[in-house]
Image (cartoon, rainbow, N blue to C red):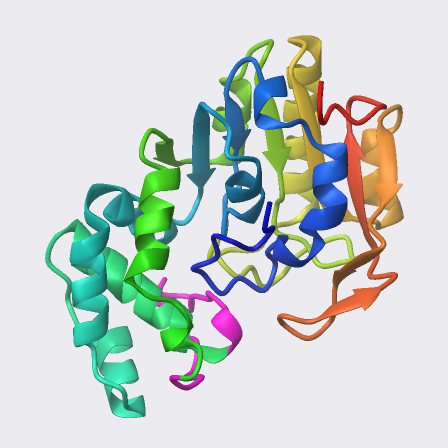
Amino acid sequence: MNYESISFLRYPGGKGRMLEFLVKHLPSSTAITGKYVEPFVGGGSVYFSIQPKKAVLSDANQDLIDLYLGIQKDARNVWKNFVRFGRTKTEYFRVRDVYSPRGLTQKAARVLFLNRTCFKGMWRHNSNGDFNVGYGGQDRRWVINQENLLQVKNAIRQVKLLCSDFEEVIDNTNEGDFIFSDPPYRPNEKEQLHSHYVGKKFMFDDHIRLSKALKRATKRKVKWALTISAHPEILALYKGNCILKIPRGTGRKPGSTVNDSGEVLITNYVKPERGI
């Protein structure tokens, strides 16, 4: 498996660069007897690597889910709309602040355009709920092509896509399902005050809600894995589970990776399941 064979989004908090470590501790597609569930899908790198037979992918950001839905519906039309946008800074701000898309594929194309041309691929909203990341240039726009979107479409053709709070998604799992959870977090810190995709803060109360939802899932015999900050108060929420230090993870600067980043992988199973 080429761990980054399907990569179409710029996602500063994504797990694409640590897949080689993660997949050693995650179940293979054949080991998941139920459905694979991601309540914070983001760029979807773990999903695309495992490529499970059944999946539910969810996120609290409607723009992001619209992007996936648009590609799932008509990837070619999303690409056609994407390439129609101009190549200037002025065009970026027009699409960001003025352009009003019609229909799902135009919405998807706008999100993809902003993601590929904004600063560092960040996704941030102001107090009015408007996307407000500055211009980053065109260099990363043309790293992807129509074939990439067709690959994504093929990989998510039978996926259930939801815009939902994570708690509801996790509570809708049963024995045989597998949850991979990658919530917004800042390595070694207790709270994420500026989320890239959710458009809101992810506070310690959210971490408590998440830990309780995963505990309920454990009682239903659902297996799960979680990537999270190694802050002591967060780790305390997961006592009794398997906690592994991620050897190389997210750096302070968007898109960078460093050693000893302050991230961990937590699972409610001890031994890796891959290959079972």
Q: Is most of the magenta stretch helix, strand or loop?
A: loop
Residue 190 placed where, x, y %?
A: 77, 52
Give me the residue at 33% from left, 29% from top. 158
Query: Which x, y percent locates residue 164?
Result: 41, 36
Q: Residue at x 52, y 36 (%)?
A: 39
State which quarter of the image contains the C terminus.
top right
Viewport quadrant of the N terminus: top right
Residue lying at 63% horizontally and 70% vertically, measured from the top left: 255
Question: On the picture, is 65 further left or further right than 202?
Answer: left
- Is 27 left or right of 72, judged from the image as shown? right
Q: Residue furthest front?
A: 1
- Residue 188 visible somewhere in the drawing: no
Q: Position of residue 35 (x, y in %)?
A: 50, 20
In this rendering, the answer to whether 28 lies above or below 109 is above
Asked if the magenta segment contains residue 215, the reply would be no
| Left or right: 203 in relation to 51 | right
Question: Closest to the observer: 131 or 40?
Answer: 40
Q: Who's the residue at 56% across and 55% down the image?
A: 4
Closer to the camera, 189 or 56?
56
Tally of numbered tags = 0
Residue in front for this viewpoint, 107 or 215: 107
Nearer to me, 218 or 199: 218
Is residue 235 in view?
A: yes
Which segment did they paint magenta? 120-138
Asked if residue 127 is positioned above or below residue 240 in the image, the reply reads: below
Question: Residue 262 in the image: x percent, y percent?
Answer: 84, 56
Q: Is residue 225 above or below residue 111?
A: above
